[in-house]
Image (cartoon, rainbow, N blue to C red):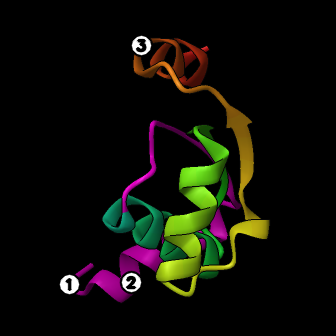
Amino acid sequence: MQHLSEIVEEARKKGKKRLAVAYGQDAHTLAAVYAAYKEGLVEPILFGDPKIIEQVCKEENIDCNIFKIIPESNDVKCVNLAVN
């Protein structure tokens, strides 16, 4: 494989993977997760503050309805939830 598009295509063939993101509340993280979702690569689960996630999604024109959001405001608890 010589191009990123070839890697993405191979990943797509293997089916969507669950992606758990702890405290993924910033614009860069949400945009990356959204892009992976649009490529058909992941089923995203976000752990964090739903109000912040929804606000950032609104500011970045990201459809937050595609995310499964697990509410948790404590960053350490977010990490524990995401890895379990």
Part of the protein shown in magenta: 1-26
Residue type pointed to by label 2: Glu
User: On residue 76, which mark appears?
Assistant: 3
**Crowd band around label 1 with a 10 angstrom C-alpha radius: few (<14), some (14–19), many (20+):** few
Q: Residue at x 71, y 58 (%)?
A: 67
The quarter holding residue 63 reads bottom right
In magenta segment, residue 14: yes
Q: Where residue 4 sits in the image (x, y, percent)?
A: 29, 82
The quarter holding residue 37 reads bottom right
* SS state under label 3: helix
Residue type pointed to by label 1: Gln
Q: Disc 2 designates what residue?
A: 6
Residue type pointed to by label 3: Val
Q: Residue at x 66, y 75 (%)?
A: 40
Q: Is residue 23 left or right of residue 49?
A: left
Q: Disc 1 designates what residue?
A: 2
